[in-house]
Image (cartoon, grey):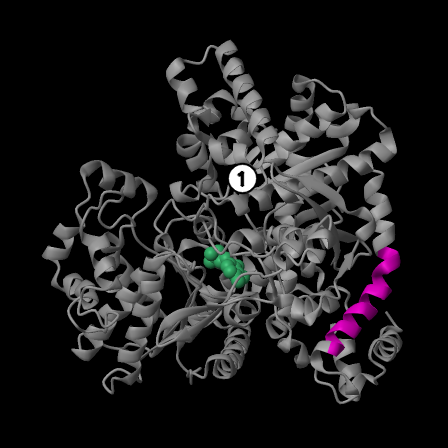
Amino acid sequence: MGNIMEKLELTAQSMYCKKVEELTPSELHLSLGKAVMGEIAPNWEASKAKHNNNRRAYYFSAEFLMGRMMYNNLYCLGILDDVKKLLKKKGVDINVFEDIDDAALGNGGLGRLAACYLDSAATQEVPLDGYGIRYKYGLFKQLIKDGYQVEVSDNWQRFEDPWCLRREDEAVLVSFKDQTVRAIPYDMAVIGCKTSNINTLRLWQAEAVNDFDFTAFNDTEYDKAVKEKNDAENITKVLYPNDNKYEGKVLRLKQQYFFCSASLQDIMRRYKAKHGNDFSYFAKENAIQLNDTHPVSCVPELVRLLMLENMNFDEAFEIARKTCAYTNHTVLGEALEKWPADLMTQVVPEIYHIICLIANKCQEELTAKGISEDMKAKMRIVDGNVVHMARLATYASTYVNGVAQLHTEILKDDVLKEWYQVYPERFQNKTNGITQRRWLGLCNPELAAMITDKVGSDEWLTDLSLISKLNESVNDTRTINKFNTIKKKKKVQLAEYIKKMDGYDVNPDTIFDIQVKRLHEYKRQLLNAFSIMTIYYRLKENKLKNWTPTTFIFGAKAAPGYARAKAIIKYINEIANLVNNDPDTKDLLQVYFISNYNVSYAEKIVVAADISEQTSTAGLEASGTGNMKFMLNGAVTLGTYDGANIEIAECAGEENEYIFGARVEDIEKLKAEGYDPKKLYDANPEIKRVVDTLIDGTFDDDGAQGEGSFKELHDSLLKDSSWQKADNYFLIYDLPLYVDAKIKANADYADRKAFGKKCLMNIANAGKFSSDRAIVEYAKEIWHVSHK
Ligand SMILES: *Cc1c(COP(=O)(O)O)cnc(C)c1O
């Protein structure tokens, strides 16, 4: 990498006729990106050739939440510090790249997981390439105006994209009932750390076969002349902004089929170049991981493509089933994809026809196994007008996996229980992970240096199990003090960043209690808000002694169509407005809702937290990965027995977390008994007072005098509706337990040494939560491919 600066100078000159120091931030970004791409090209070529000669795996995902690429790529190449110094010599601050938007081609955890897995596969030399969609507009940007969320489109490509190469020569055609479009691949290099291996993320962009209709133009029908172009480009125009919610729109189905078909054609073309028309090696050479059901049309499409090669349906299906494996990410009913058959017929009739063949085959197989009619009915892939995508994915896969131990158990004895009974050998657990390179090395260099010092080398960057060496120092006062000093520094840095981004004055001498994640009822940001109001009233009435001043920080995007989620954002901002300005409490309690939470914001936030809020209703958060980012950076978890929180507490010791509330068994029992939140609310004046702030005029309810969106939230907690029970997420049950746990954590914080030890115990025992561990498990136990 010695001549990176020379390459940069040449690139700047040829692209802009400028010296490096004269470039604007976006010009510098493009030039340096191109220079880096030039440097890595030989390694990338060599890695591609190697993948081609061996069994390999593909990660199919509708989302890849990559975040900002520049710092990460320089970091993984081991040249971040050098480039920083060399730019500084030219009077350029490397922080200029903060002006470049994140690549936000994902909603939240699922998309970020895909990005962490690519990073880990590259570093662990797992032959894994990603396939996805190159959305023109990624996840919307969020502004907060008068306490409300406002969405702005995310035109991330306006900075151009030095990390992707357009491969016009490898374009393919994808056909729907009413249109045929070109799929153009854009290849992004995924750079490994401490290895020459470089993997590929291939993202497809939809374009018209004929950009422009001259006949129509000459007939002065200008709209018609560009119609085909617009109709084609619309397919990859925008990422659907729902997290954990299925959206049954024609365009969404087109997106899914579009990238599956293009990716499979690509894989088939490579295969045929090697083996001609003999497909007997296909499943031996290729493994495809389906990231949730979004890419499940991959199965019927692969069957279709193989049948075009003169294979019969049964042979083709056997190959498809042996090739695919499915990761389930959720147990929420509203998130499970159920496509209407008539909609599928209207968009991709051949695919629907093949799904019906698969569905029949499945029922025949179950009959042959002597499965009862009753159970067979529960396992219909096509049931009346509904296609159950999770059932299709389960039937048509070699393996099905959940993403944390508890989640996998729930799949086995609830969501997919019939399938587990018939095909138990298919079920596996693969607890999620995060890459320690981005989520510690890059975003917390101060803590990383301390860990390197304790471990004795920086080998933990590629083998996080080594971080357990830190266990030897958790009682050492100097180490604890050092950690506390670093944490303070990260809080000061976050306070500066919040000032710059949101204009708030955050006091770093307070506890930072942080909840950042997508806004969803099941994640229970509203429970956090209620706990803050409870504490606020106790403080005002002098009922809470020895409270250490605390800053509560929230960050969350609500899906634009999710009214309750938006109401919760407004409610939190109303609370902020009240407590931050109340002279009785403003020095004890501060609340801030930061805008546009994304990967780059996350990198600054997770390092600065003292307390990590993970409050989902037990059983509903499949894993969580935010929880792992906080743990790795030395925050204690204030959370429920849910998802990976359980494994986090197991690893770090439950005495080093604040676990509260109903467990899955308790929730089941409450449901069986007929949970009555109204009764708890009537019996507990403190709960009643806090919940009623939604309707009693404490806050401005959309100017609707207690009849607006806060009233709707209030009703959702206390009244059954036609589609949901009262307090479906058990906020009222958990609130008192949660407040107790929060106050306990606050009291414990005052003993800086004991609390520091808890934080260190979290860091030292975070080894399991590396996505390197997870990806090597997938490589060994699901894909059967090589690794480092
Ligand atoms: C890690 C991450 C998430 C997932 O957070 P959870 O708390 O696991 O839901 C969502 N968004 C961004 C930007 C992230 O970095």
Instruction: Tell me if residue 134 is in the magenta stretch.
Output: no
Q: Main secondary structure of the magenta part?
A: helix
Q: Is mark 1 within 8 Å of ligand 1?
A: no
Disc 1 is placed on an element classified as loop
- Tell me if residue 693 comes above or below residue 327 in the rendering: below
Q: Quadrant of residue 372?
A: top left
Q: Quadrant of residue 514?
A: bottom left
Instruction: Pick whichever, 173 or 511, lies toward us.
Output: 173
Residue 732: image location, x then y, percent: 22, 55
Q: In the orientation shown, which residue stands out farthest toward the bottom?
A: 91
Disc 1 residue crowd, few under 14, some 14–19, many 20+, Cα 10 Å: many
Left or right? Give the position of 139 relative to 588: right
- Tell me if residue 535 comes above or below residue 647 in the rendering: below
> Can residue 123 be seen in this snapshot?
no
Left or right? Give the position of 322 relative to 391: right
Residue 555: image location, x then y, percent: 44, 68
Which residue is label 1 attached to?
293
Residue 541: image location, x then y, percent: 16, 78
Quarter placement of the N terminus? bottom right
Left or right? Give the position of 295 relative to 127: left
Which residue is drawn at the image coordinates 56% and 66% (left, top)? 154
> Which residues, given as a range, are shown in magenta?
27-43
Instruction: Pick whichever, 195 or 718, lies toward us.
Output: 718
- Tell me if residue 175 comes above or below residue 651 in the rendering: above
Instruction: Pick whichever, 777 or 137, lies toward us.
Output: 137
Which residue is drawn at the image coordinates 38% and 49% (left, top)? 641
> Can residue 115 be seen in this snapshot?
yes
Residue 767: image location, x then y, percent: 59, 54
Instruction: Pick whichever, 744 or 691, lies toward us.
Output: 691
> Count of labels shown?
1
The amino acid type, in three-letter code, at marker 1 is: Thr
Left or right? Give the position of 96 relative to 554: right
